Amino acid sequence: MHIGLIGLGKMGYNMRERLRSRGVEVTGYDRNPDVSDVATVDDLIAALPTPRVVWVMVPAGSITDQVISELGEKLAEGDLVIDGGNTKFSSDQEHSEALAPKGIHFVDCGVSGGVWGLENGYGLMVGGAEADVERLMPVFDALRPDGAREESFVHVGETGAGHYAKMVHNGIEYGLMQAYAEGYELLEAKDIIKDVPGTFRAWQKGTVVRSWLLDLLVKALEEDPKLSNVGAYIEDSGEGRWTVEQAIANEVAAPAITAALFARFSSRQEDAPSLKMVAALRNQFGGHAVRPPRNSA
């Protein structure tokens, strides 16, 4: 199988490499010529066999809108566009409806795995028509981890369902990171605790709180035991906000996720140790940039 991939940043670059290593031919385009296989989107389209498959992996919002609009003008009937970014689920229907008059198919795919996906594989949550998803299974199987498909891949439902599931996934992620981070601050605050990194390390096997996030927390502390190089300023990608909006719209109580989102807002005014840990965790799994401590200037 041969696909196009637009967007070769932290995620897209590694996805291209994993697909190639699993036998999927990829022609990638990026505005950065140092990583791009072709010079223009037109060149990418010309390089693909028909019917074409183009995976879009660019920042959510106006950039994604622009790329999908451009593809709508240049692709042909039977071609298929996958949006693998963190697009808001409600935009997927708009994109699908804009492409449909030309007979261009659309699939949304929530992707989890961060900068570790090249090695470990990616968790995939997909929305779209059954026939389109089936057509793309060689791509999805190459990207996901080895093992049972149902443990890392799901066809969630119709258009938008994949990104909705990814939104909820990220909302849960907010809550989990905040809980670990608050535990970190509690341990740091108590004088009888002499080995905070060792405490978290001892939780990695056998305990009910073991997880990959815990493993990354331990890694962050091994690299910087006091988080002295990490500021407590935490960005939010938007998905936490959308999760809280949907909780309100559907009258679902989501106090942990909501509180974790509000904690990120408060991080922009203070330098609490727990918020430094959330910043460190985001850097560990997603390569998100961290700011230096406010008093380090």
Image (spheres, helix red, strand yellow):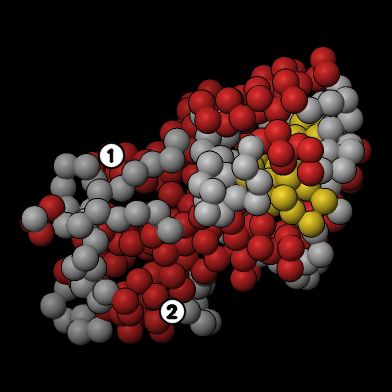
Evaluate whether residue 238 shows in this view. yes
Q: Is residue 78 left or right of residue 180?
A: right
Residue at 81% in and 43% down: 48
- Choose the circle earlier in sequence order: 1 or 2: 2
Evaluate whether residue 168 shows in this view. no
| Residue 49, above or below 273 | above
Residue at numbered disc 1 = 265
Residue at numbered disc 2 = 203
Residue 24 occupies which quadrant of the picture? bottom right
Q: Position of residue 72 (x, y in %)?
A: 73, 23
Helix, strand or loop at mark 1: helix
Q: Position of residue 10 (x, y in %)?
A: 51, 55
Q: Nearer the viewer, residue 233 or 157?
A: 233
Q: Nearer the viewer, residue 281 or 104?
A: 104
Residue that extends furthest to the top in the rendered view of this protein: 101
The crowd level at tag 2 (other Cα within 10 Å; few <14, some 14-19, many 20+) is: some
Q: CA distance from mark 1 to mark 2?
A: 29 Å
| Residue 172, above or below 122 | above
Q: Position of residue 150 (x, y in %)?
A: 78, 58
Q: Position of residue 6 (x, y in %)?
A: 64, 42
Count of labels in the image: 2
> Of tags 1 and 2, which is closer to the observer?
1
Residue at 17% in and 53% down: 271
Indicate which disc residue 190 carries: none
Q: Nearer the viewer, residue 36 or 131?
A: 36
| Residue 13, above or below 147 | above
Residue 235 occupies which quadrant of the picture? top left
Q: Nearer the viewer, residue 236 or 99?
A: 99
Q: Amino acid at mark 1?
A: Phe
